[in-house]
Image (cartoon, coloured by chain):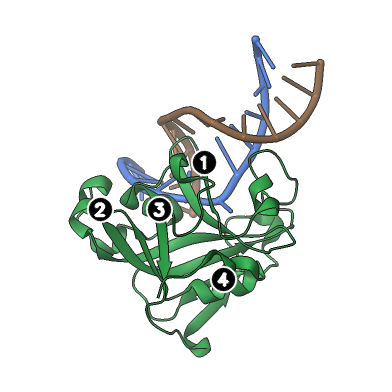
Chain colours: A green, B blue, C brown
DNA sequence: TACTGGATTCACT
DNA sequence: GTGAATCCAGTAA
């Protein structure tokens, strides 16, 4: 069942958890979301200080938010929080369909290395700034796939951000080989 | 107009 | 484990 824009109106941390196990489709490629990260108005988030780029985190929910980083990579987010600032970063995906296409784009044969990182999955799915600000379901489709039990979700600190390591807003599926 | 740094990845040691 | 690549957005002037 396809997930609607309204599904994203809740809290970013909650949505990040609920996105695990969902199927994501874009053009001819699809996969299962296995790792996510929630962002709100904390210091490490684009939402801490709103700018034209990050304004979408405050103005919308259920929208795609793509930004460019380190001169090389894109990161895919979904905006959340109907009346507040929030977004969920998709960190890793288990590939389902279009695997050969992904392998070509990533110049990589190892299936575990196709989407095991925010920059990697955008490269594999060919997601760029062109998808920024689109509604969920317009180009990128999220649908229910399998139910993940609470006991199968690992909650950890966010990584690589010294300012925010006290936060426990990163989620991934236990015993999954496709996380970053 | 110029400068700074980043929600990353990869190659190399 | 460490460092380079790479360019855009944000900031300050």
Q: Residue at x 71, y 40 (%)?
A: A51
Foreground tag (3 vs 1): 3
Is the residue under label 2 in contact with that under label 4 (CB below 8 Å)?
A: no
Same chain for mark 3 and mark 2? The answer is: yes
Image: A111 above or below A150: above
- Quick check: can you spot residue A43? yes
Could you tell me how far apart the alpha carbons at marks 4 and 2 are, in whole angstroms? 28 Å
Q: Which residue occupies the foreground of this view, A25 or A119? A: A25
Q: Chain of mark 2?
A: A
Where disc 1 sits, the SS reads: strand
Where does the image place residue A90, in percent across and percent down from the top left? 48, 60
Q: Earlier in the sequence, mark 2 or mark 1?
A: 1
Q: Which residue is mark 4?
A: A7
**Where does label 1 land, which residue?**
A69
Q: Check if mark 4 and mark 2 are on a common chain.
A: yes
User: Nearest the camera: A45 or A78?
Assistant: A78
Q: Which residue carries the number 2 mark?
A: A102
Tell me the SS state at disc 3. Answer: loop
Q: Residues within 10 Å of mark 4 (few under 14, many from 20)?
A: few
Q: Earlier in the sequence, mark 3 or mark 4?
A: 4
Give the side of residue A91 with respect to residue A109, left or right. Answer: right
Label 1 resides on the chain identified as A
- The front one of A158 and C11 is C11
Cα separation, mark 3 vs mark 2, equals 17 Å
The residue under label 3 is A139
| Precedes in sequence: disc 3 or disc 1 | 1
């Amino acid at each position: 069942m396809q997930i609607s824009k309204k599904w994203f109106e809740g809290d970013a941390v909650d949505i990040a958890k609920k996105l695990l196990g969902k199927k994501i489709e874009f053009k001819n490629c699809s996969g299962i979301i296995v790792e996510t990260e929630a962002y709100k108005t904390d210091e490490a988030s684009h939402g801490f200080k709103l700018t034209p780029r990050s304004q979408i985190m405050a103005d919308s929910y259920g929208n795609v938010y793509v930004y460019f980083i380190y001169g090389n990579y894109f990161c895919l987010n979904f905006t959340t929080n109907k009346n507040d600032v929030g977004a969920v970063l998709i960190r890793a995906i288990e590939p389902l369909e279009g695997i050969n296409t992904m392998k070509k784009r990533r110049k990589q044969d190892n299936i575990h290395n196709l989407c095991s990182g925010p920059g990697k999955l955008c490269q594999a799915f060919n997601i760029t700034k062109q998808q920024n600000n689109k509604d969920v379901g317009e180009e990128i489709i999220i649908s229910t796939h399998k139910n993940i039990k609470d006991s199968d979700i690992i909650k950890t600190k966010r990584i690589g951000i010294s300012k925010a390591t006290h936060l426990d807003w990163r989620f991934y599926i236990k015993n999954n080989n496709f996380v970053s």
